[in-house]
Image (cartoon, helix red, strand yellow):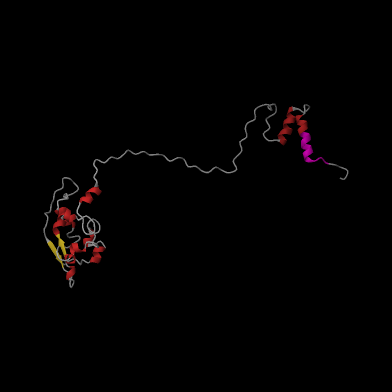
Amino acid sequence: MHGKRFLKPGVILALLFTLALGSGCAVETRHKILAAVFEHVPPAGQQNAEPAPYVGHPRRQPPYKPPPAAVVRLKAYKPAFKFDWRGILLKLPKDAAGGVDWVAALEDDKIEPKAGLDPSSQDLYPVMPLDVQLDPKGLPMFDATFPHKPHTEWLACDSCHPKIFKMKAGADPITMAKIFAGEYCGRCHGKVAFEPTTGCARCHLALAGPQ
């Protein structure tokens, strides 16, 4: 082994490359040598053809781009009528808490409730000018007065009787706690009528002081 010398791989490649470019090497042999050393060597006899561009894969995949969302165009909605509700409410009388005083609006002919949502609805019940006294035992300052008149201008009798209030004086255990919880008077007051927490003197007339 000491007397033998081996050519380095780089020298062997250089010799093969020289032979491939020399004029004495056949076309097929030259192609095999060049194809073994380089990538994308054109087939034998097509060395002068334009090489196809090499397209490599990206090192990182491009971020995902979702397709554009479809645009839905709706026809413009134009109501048949329009009221300036804010302006109307500002013109209505106010109570001590700053809310609309609907009873005063009725008495001043500022509003006129309709019989129903259907334009052909008719009043089936008359307005009843009857006040009902509710007297809690031992608390004369908290005697309450329920006026039927403004309520029957808004509601029919069967709106309250007998589901909410029985048709007998003292038959319902009405308390302020139950009203605050949405029972009895709390079915409307605090929702569509004045707040019971700010309208105490509206029912407990003694709390309003001398007239």
Q: In which quarter of the image is residue 8?
A: top right
The spot of residue 178 in percent (x, y) is: 24, 65
Q: In which quarter of the image is residue 55?
A: top right
Q: Is residue 81 left or right of residue 12?
A: left
The spot of residue 203 in percent (x, y) is: 18, 63
Decide whether the magenta segment is chiefly helix, strand or loop: helix
Q: Is residue 58 magenta?
A: no
Seen from the viewer's position, the closer of residues 177 and 89 is 89
Q: Is residue 7 magenta?
A: yes
Whether residue 176 appears in this view of the structure is yes
Whether residue 168 appears in this view of the structure is no
Quadrant in the picture for the N terminus: top right
Q: Is residue 40 left or right of residue 99?
A: right
Quadrant in the picture for the C terminus: bottom left
Q: Which residue is found at the position 78% from the left and 40% from the top?
A: 9
Q: Quadrant of residue 160?
A: bottom left
Residue at the front extreme, as displayed: 210
Which segment did they paint magenta? 6-16
The spot of residue 188 in percent (x, y) is: 22, 58
